[in-house]
Image (spheres, rainbow, N blue to C red):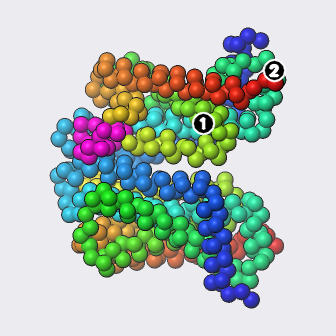
Amino acid sequence: MTPRWKIALALAYRQSTVLIKNPSLFVPPLLFPLMSFLAFAGGLSALKHIPGFNFRGGYTAFQFVFVLLQSAAFSGVFMGFNVARDFEYGFARRLLIAASHRTGLIMGYALSALLRWSVVAIVLTTVALIAHMKVGGNGVDLVGLYTLAVILNFAGVLWASGIALRIRSTQGAPLMQTPVFLTLFLAPVYVPLHLLQGWIHAVAKINPVTYLLTAGRGFISGSPVDVGLAFGSGVAVSGAFLLWALLGLRRAERAAS
Amino acid sequence: MNVAGQVLSIAGRSVTRTFRQPAMIIPNVTFPLLLLAINSNGLRAATHLPGFPTNSFLDFFIPISFMQGALFASGTAGVDLARDIDSGFLNRLALTPMRGVALLLGQLGGAVAIGTIQAVVYLGVGIAAGVRFETGVAGALVLFVLAVLIALGFGAVGILIALRTGSGEAVQSVFPLLFFLLFVSSMNLPRNLIEVNWFRDLATVNPVSYMIEAMRTLVISGWNAQALGLGFLFTFLMIGLALAASAASLRSRMART
């Protein structure tokens, strides 16, 4: 029997090949974070003058962390589109028949999402450094920042795969991306949490992404805060979505048999 | 059948087809509203910046909903025409006495229909949420007309892309680039408050900034002939140029042999 990791590697290799051969699948997910970064860091930098805006790392770094986390989550979500497409073309059905350990399939899609996001992260980081982003954190802090992004990438792919395994059609795409989009933007995207007012402040306070953002911004400025809360909520959300994806896999198996 | 009859016939088909796809209408209408709700609260602190032209970010941001809606309309018009090319409908039309201009104007019917619905919804929601027009009812009517014209203009751009590429996937792939025009505009802050020079320069040469500013002045600062003139000028230019280029592309697409 083929071990799980071999199935995962084979599927990740196949997914990466598909992406390389289809720029229309790869370029938009790469362009969106860059556009967001340019628009937010370039167009909104005056927000650092708002009374009470006390982030030490500069507005470029402030926005970089959000866009990095956003790109990680959406690279995961876009992999959910691929899962759905594989079902539409019948490839996923053949995978379900061929794979001896089907959880290896989820591992493969997750690995592929991580590889896809790695390219986005390299390009985004390069652009941010060219834009003179201030990095106050040390090596350990930066490892912390990118680890948070990896956790979010994992959560994103598991959430979207769970939907794709249940609906098995690209028509489920809005269901995959809209909740993720809303959750990300219902966090302190443009200004720190204490400067938000009204209902959005109340929502942001209970949104786990807020703690990932706060910790990430702490890492890049060299003053880590809410680290335990961020990793704890990130791992808890990923664990819940892992269960969600595995149950989706069971449902897809039943539908295929 | 004369040209007007041909336009009406194609427009009727385009509108019917658009309304038969709720999956295309509902997200196009609701997504800009979600962004309006989130950004008008998330960016409310920006009104504390010295020189910010209003103390309501909702008033400042409402024109962006119309712009986003218009951009989505471009995708709808482009994808629908690309489907007609792909399915051979356009080739069959080439066998009839249908005039090219009738086809172009008629195909825009769906975009105009969505643009009109969006304009009504955004105006209604905005006013219900507390947007007050400095220019009164007349200003709201002018904004409505400009919003529909902008939807028409972006719809024409969508049609041009469809005629050039003949592929719905290509239209979808170009869509992020159109969105980029919105991102590098005075969407989030007035141009005089944008601190980063290259971003302010891009926003200044970007016609989308002038379309936004024309709508914005109607809401927050009263009648401004220069802003309105520039907004309408760039809108009519976009419509004219996109239709002229589309007509040239259509001639080769509908080559009668």
**Left or right for A242, reference B3:** left
State the residue at coordinates (65%, 46%): B169
Image position, residue A14 (x, y; %): 66, 70
Image position, residue A241 (x, y; %): 55, 72
Q: Is residue A195 magenta?
A: no
State the residue at coordinates (20%, 50%): A50
Q: Chain of mark 2?
A: B
Quarter of the image for residue A163 reads: bottom right
Q: Is residue B65 above or below residue A99?
A: above
Q: Earlier in the sequence, mark 2 or mark 1?
A: 2
Name the residue that disc number 1 marks. B161
In the rendered image, the quadrant that contains the C terminus of chain B is top right
Image position, residue B120 (x, y; %): 50, 29
Q: Is residue A243 above or below residue B68?
A: below
Q: Chain of mark 1?
A: B
Residue at disc 2, secondary structure: loop
Name the residue that disc number 2 marks. B96
Q: Residues within 10 Å of mark 2 (few under 14, many from 20)?
A: few
Q: How far apart are labels 2 and 1 at the CA level?
A: 24 Å
Q: Is residue B199 magenta?
A: yes
Residue sitting at the far top: B2
Number of numbered labels in the structure image: 2
State the residue at coordinates (26%, 50%): A45
In the rendered image, the quadrant that contains the N terminus of chain B is top right
